[in-house]
Image (tube, helix red, strand yellow):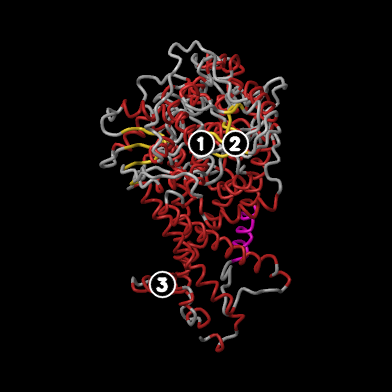
Amino acid sequence: MFLSQHDPENVTRILFQDFPVWMVVSFYIIGFLAIGVFLYGVWAQIRKYRRGVRSGAWSPFWPRFKAMVATVLSHRTIKRRAPAAGRMHVWIFYGFALLFIGTSIITLDQDITGPFGVHFWYGSFYLVFGVVMDVAGVALIGGLLYMMYRRKWLALPKLDYARPDREPGDPDYDRSWYRREDWAFLWSLIIIAFTGFLLEASRVVWLQGDPTVWDFRWHAPVGTSVAYVMMALGLGPEGAGDLRMGLWWFHGILALTFVALIPYTKVKHIFTAMGSLMARDPEGKRRMPPADVEAERIGINYLGDFSDKYLLNLDACTKCGRCHEACPANAAGYPLSPRDLVLSLREMSGDKLSHASMPEGPIEVIGDGVNMIRPETLWACRTCAACIEICPVGIEHLPMIVEMRRTLIEQGEFDPMLQPTLKSLQKSGNSLGESARKRPRWTRKLDFEIKDARKEPVDVLWYVGDYASFDPRSQKVTIAFARILNAIGIDFGILFEAEQTAGNDVRRVGEEGLFQALAEANIELLDSCEFKTIVTTDPHTYNTVKNEYPEFGGNYEIEHASSMLERLIREGKIPTPKNLDYRVTYHDPCHLGRINDGAEPPRQVLGRLGLDLVELPRNRDNSFCCGAGGGRIWMAEPPEMKKPAELRAAEAAGIDGLDILVVNCPKCLNMMEDGVKGTGNEGNFRVMELIELVEEAMGLTDEPEPEGDGDGTETEQVGAA
């Protein structure tokens, strides 16, 4: 309002006002030293990443860059499942960013364009600048105070950094220094922001006699408010001048120290998180890294085997604990926390790869040494991808775990129960140790024949899967699905005894050679058949055929049974004369709901059946794994450990009046029935497959079963010719 009464060029802040020359020179020397320390730290980090295997993960650059910028500016990954913390991080991020931009503007005016006589930091621009900087400072302090409250008074367990993979007394058990680093980070930023306001206030008091300062004081509203408090406490211009000088140096040196330490401390996540988000593979939870099985060795055994992208992932971790909290193995008491696995590898890479000279010889990452990853940690993983899904900075824990499992498989260091399973898979193409001839035996219980897709064309090829073919409980679901397809006239067929496991869990166990052999054989078989689409009731099979077979030339249109049923009901092709009067809850299979974004079709089916659906606390992409994935269904659970399925069943038991826990996967059916029994809830509610409910609604459950062969000695049905 008073700008017209003053020369606009005088409405500014003289940066080094009343500073002797030696002070100005000293400041620039300190500033250049800080920048030098910062740049060296940046180079040391880049050198560390270059010591990994080149991944090319940042190509194509511009589309990835744009996606990263959109994610960072929206904070969508940080707000997920922690909206309050996400909002406060927005305050911190934008407050810090604006203050950084403001400091850069001053530097540009004073040190880059200024020596050439070009100044712009005055007048109206300067006044708007002051308001924006005050708002940014308040936002920064407000966000930081909330984070302090969250860490100290909410005392979230995921932020205590307790390690499930170590015991007290182990040299790498104590991570209390991470907490100290967190607090140092928070306090440093708060002090920098707060002393900035004090510096602003002391300048207003000191120069209250200067109209170009006093007349425009409210364009720095926070600083001016503090100035009035200072004056009320008796501070005069002379004392304010002395205070301003001391604050100037304290604030400046603290800020420069903060900048210098960015590459060496938690603060570097500002940059590494952006790089990690750029390198993120959108298919990382669906498909595992390719491997050359003809190579001398595959997988990750040494620190130098990690790609540059994975090494950057390690530094991007903010220790937020969301993956730690989401991990079913960690919740069940197993020695695995995705966060701690990443931090161990980060500490090792920082210790071994950051120096100018490399240690002699390869650096093993798997073992019992300090910061090494123990085999039992790797085998605890369910490969459910909950860690990847929730990580706000794009870390891909699961592929790293699978790569290290490949090394363990090559070295023969795995659970003894895996050996017979892998032999069975190699010999007969299934994980249950059954003869391939028994695979289609369930078809004898039908009063109609199923086509043999190897011998005649079909519209829909049904890839049945291991558990759906051999497990007695899952066979009931398989029979139900066959009845549904037959009742509505779908032209479908199966592969009978020629079908083998698709290999999803084989690959995630780390047996890459066996997986590739299965994939190639299955693709050759599928290519020899004539069909339009594939359907499967098994989300594990669905994931592998859809997302991993294209790597080997197998490109097929595949649908999970739940989406097929939803579509057929919606199109009126499946009549549902019965309205089912049950209160149900639905357990999302990891490989369908989270990994393949298939959470809604099953719910739409339940809605069309008239069921009263009550959601579990953790659902859709936040679903809690049943514990079967990653080959864990083939391994015994130690008796002292909780079972993830029991934890899940206990969640369901908390729903009043629950009749049915609905599942949508053969492995989930197996695990959840055990979980319900293990928690003593078998008399309280049932576990049913979605397909069984559709069958009941269609009125097909009362159909008489044909006479079986009793002793199972007759020849299996081979389908209609």
Q: Which of marks 2 and 3 is nearer the N terminus?
A: 3
Q: Where on the picture, by quarter, is residue 41? A: top right
What is the magenta range?
20-32
Instruction: Characterize the magenta stretch by its predominant secondary structure.
Output: helix
Q: Which of marks 3 and 1 is nearer the N terminus?
A: 3
Is residue 22 inside the magenta stretch? yes
The residue under label 1 is 485
Dot 1: element: helix
- The front one of 8 and 395 is 395
Left or right of 237 on screen, residue 350: right
CB under 8 Å between discs 2 and 1: yes
- The front one of 647 and 315 is 647
Residue 361 location (% of width, % of height)? 67, 22
Q: Where on the picture, by quarter, is residue 699? A: top left
The residue under label 3 is 227
Left or right of 327 on screen, residue 425: right
Left or right of 408 on screen, residue 611: left
Residue 412 location (% of width, % of height)? 58, 14
Q: Which mark is residue 460?
A: 2
Is residue 662 inside the magenta stretch? no
Rendered position, 116 above or below 437 = below
Task: Examine the rendering and report whether any part of residue 114 can be seen.
Answer: yes
Residue 252 location (% of width, % of height)? 54, 59
